[in-house]
Image (cartoon, grey):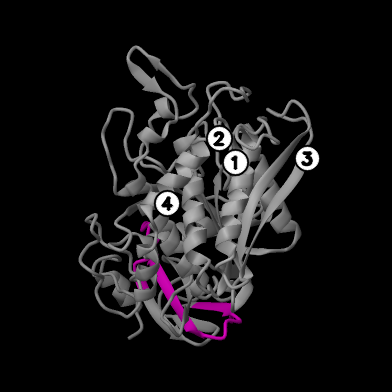
Amino acid sequence: MRPTRRTVLTAAAGAAALTAGGTEAAAATPQGSRPPATTQHPSRELRSLLRELDPARIEATVRKLVSFGTRHTLSAQGDPARGIGAARDWLLAELRSYAADSGGRMTAELQSYVQEPASRIPTATRITNVVATLRGSVTPERVYVVSGHYDSRVTDVMDATSDAPGADDDASGVAVVLELARVMAKRRPAATIVFAAVAGEEQGLYGSTYLAQQLKAAGTDVQGMFTNDIVGSPTADDGTENPYTIRLFAEGVPSSETPAQAAIRKSVGGENDSATRQLARFVRDVADNDATGMRVRVIYRRDRYLRGGDHIPFLERAYPAARFTEPAEDFAHQHQNVRVEDGKQYGDLPEFCDFGFVTRVAKVNAATLWTLAQAPGTPKGAKILTAALTNSTTLVWTRGSEPDLAGYEIVWRETTAPEWTHVIPAGDVTTYEVDLSKDNVFFGVRAVNRAGLRSPVAFPDPQS
């Protein structure tokens, strides 16, 4: 039964929230919070994939990267045993070994350019990303990106010679990316997934900026990007632990917003409904559950104070992008020279990483990326018709091209609610009318395929 205006007047939005099938939401997640109405339960296929993620391999990757002494962007590029060049060559060999098991679906390559002197780059320096691409088997033009940065640093950001182990920042994130690539290489995602170990992050996001520029210049339809940066430990600087939570930083007002887009956002109150916020809600929908063993704590910010990450160049180019980071950082174990001072060990060493935690972070990433790649793409052209003053709402959108597309759902929530609270099956149509006022609630549209997998939500612009 379609909701009516009386529905909103007689029931608090969110109470007995409807799931996609129209039943009451499950009682609670393992972390104790009611799941959103848009929650998608892990499939048997996804659970099998998650079981393959191996903490021993993740630990081995972190320790191998640490073994190169320093991976500073300005360190040696030709030494086979020490420096960023040695790390680069090892990463490429690893990704190529995974590609060999992919049946030709995965390729691995170096993506290089020469950065002329700039901030924190005193002389012309070659910056190289190591990139593996797993081509989609159904809609390869739709792309998702996951990254970690393989460069490291100590206290002085220009010190390219001292040991900079970089275990947490960010061998942990690179280990997540490599393990995802290893496990997914043997599978056939519908959409394309790009696995990137980028360089130059500590000097100013140089590698990720180049990667984002290349994708944008090629007109690539990147529908989601995640960076994993400092995901190695659940232990805070005071020793408290939160081993089953990962933070996800997701901006509201888009970094790429134009004046015209700002005017629309202000008119509709869309500060909490950017494409990145919808992506973050999707992560909660598919990865905050017993299959990952994790709670995803979404933070309504682009990043932490005084910090930045490799998702930002993607945001600046109008791609939805977000950052995974451990729940509370210990700053004695990042951006520090390795030393003992007053009996306290400083330095970003592997002994301060929790590899079980990193594996659970990898599961959150895997659940998100695999579901994104197998589900339909985010609906395009979503509009809410505003030509007439009515107390009902009509939405329109463009039908997707996926061969297994089954139809669409309308989602809605109170304007004060952070998550979508209600779902209305709309069928295989491109227009739908809801007997609720567009002035009182927020609406969205998501696609559904025949396997029951749902896309992220598209937030509609007004169309007069």
Give coordinates of residue 80: x percent, y percent: 64, 37
Q: Which residue is mark 3?
A: 114
Quarter of the rendering occupied by the N terminus: bottom left
Judge depth for marks 3 and 2 and give the one in front. 2
Residue 355, placed above or below residue 156? below
In three-dimensional space, the C-alpha distance between marks 2 and 1, rounded to whole angstroms, equals 7 Å
Q: Residue at x 35, y 64 (%)?
A: 51
Mark earlier in primary sequence (3, 2): 2
Q: Are marks 2 and 1 in contact (CB under 8 Å)?
A: yes
Residue 35, image quadrant = bottom left
Q: Which residue is mark 2?
A: 68
Looking at the picture, which amino acid does disc 4 mark? Answer: Arg
Q: Which residue is mark 4?
A: 57
Q: Which residue is mark 1?
A: 87
Residue count near mark 4 (Cα–Cα under 10 Å), binned few <14, some 14–19, many ≥20: some
Can residue 303 be seen in this snapshot?
Answer: yes
Q: Residue at x 40, y 82 (%)?
A: 425
Mark earlier in primary sequence (4, 1): 4
Q: Residue at x 76, y 44 (%)?
A: 113
Mark earlier in primary sequence (2, 4): 4
Looking at the picture, which amino acid does disc 3 mark? Answer: Val
Instruction: Tell whether 299 sits left or right of 10.
Output: right
Give coordinates of residue 202: x percent, y percent: 59, 34
Looking at the picture, which amino acid does disc 1 mark? Answer: Ala
Q: Which residues are magenta?
A: 394-422
* SS under mark 1: helix
Looking at the picture, which amino acid does disc 2 mark? Answer: Phe
Residue count near mark 3 (Cα–Cα under 10 Å), binned few <14, some 14–19, many ≥20: few
| Residue 83 sits inside the magenta stretch | no
Can residue 384 be seen in this snapshot?
Answer: no
Q: Are marks 4 and 3 in contact (CB under 8 Å)?
A: no
Residue 196, placed above or below residue 388? above
